[in-house]
Amino acid sequence: MHPDGKSPAALVERSPPLLGDFLRARRDRLRPQDFNLPSGVRRRAPGLRREEAAQLCGISPTWYTWIEQRRTTAVSVEALNAIASGLSLSRAERAYLFELASRADPAPPQIEYADPQQLLALVRAVRTPAYILDRHWDAIAWNRPAAELFVDWLGGATRSAQKAATAVNRGADRNLLRYVFLHTRARKFILNWDERARRLVAEYRADTASWRDDPVRRAMVQELCSASVAFEAAWNSQQVLSRDGGKRSFHHVRRGRCHYEQYTLRVAQRTDLKLTVLVPQGTRW
């Protein structure tokens, strides 16, 4: 019987074909000996039997069979978590499993480590201003063009690329929100500051929603609300926007007005990191 007491005939909905196909393929690739199971001599196919997979996952063989044979859509988060653990799914496979089941993973795998020095090499390879923000929006790496553009935030023209390397893991004084709202020259540097600042707060709220209970995030929001009336008003507006990029304009102390197209990308090895690249308008490659 179904855990809710329903018979198979009562379950008229079918699960997405890909989910059952994925589980079957994963089961076929697993070897009994890797789980201290007897290999046996009468196995008609490689891999684990359904009842063995069900045993490893801690669910009934009948229920596991229904899931694999696409006889139900009622696959709970708990069942998916048990399957991911029982079948030893990788980080990517676990994410794919929850995606196929249209469920949110309550305990996503830990983000893989990325060497900060490798990230610095990445932004150095970009010819236009580029920088990387961590999940608190602290700049952890940037290149010379970025330091020359954002003089008050990321350094200045005299800061060498070698010295810029020391910025890695020194993000506390390189926070983008603190710079925009607390630095005295930010309002003159960022053209259309009022609109850009409000949008930045809305982007930060959306970008860090999954970190809303993080003590560092809470402390920074409280600090900025106390120090900046503009930030407090923007934060209390509850506006939410995605960090999509677009046109950005600045008034540089030496260059005058500078116009860019901003692109924001995620670092594959660290999805909590954002690579921002500013391409001067009119640039032809």
Image (tube, grey):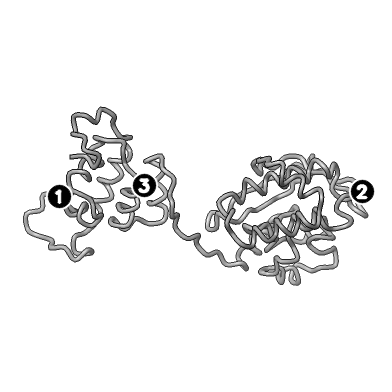
Disc 3 vs disc 1: which is toward the camera? 3
The answer to whether 264 is drawn above or below residue 147 in the figure is: above
Q: Nearer the viewer, mark 2 or mark 3?
A: 3
**Amino acid type of the residue tagged 3 in the rendering:** Val
Instruction: Using residue 5 as the reference point, say whether residue 233 is left or right of it.
Output: right
Q: Residue furthest top?
A: 12
The residue drawn where x is 44% and y is 45% is: 104
Q: Residue at x 33, y 38 (%)?
A: 18
Q: Which residue is mark 2?
A: 256
Task: Indicate the amino acid at tag 2.
Answer: Gly
Give how far across and how far down residue 52 sits, in percent. Answer: 17, 54
> Pointer 2: residues within 10 angstroms few (<14), some, or many (20+)?
few
Question: Which tag, 2 or 1, sits closer to the chain's start?
Answer: 1
Q: Residue at label 3?
A: 77
- Which of marks 1 and 3 precedes in the sequence? 1
Dot 1 amino acid type: Ala
Task: Examine the image and state in which quarter residue 149 appears.
Answer: bottom right
Local SS, label 1: loop
Quarter-of-image position of residue 213:
bottom right
Looking at the rendered structure, which numbered label has been put on residue 45?
A: 1
Rendered image quadrant of residue 140: bottom right
Identity of the residue drawn at 75% across and 41% down = 284
Quadrant location, the N terminus: top left
The residue closer to the viewer here, 222 or 143, is 222
Examine the rendered structure and indicate whether residue 234 appears above or below residue 47.
above
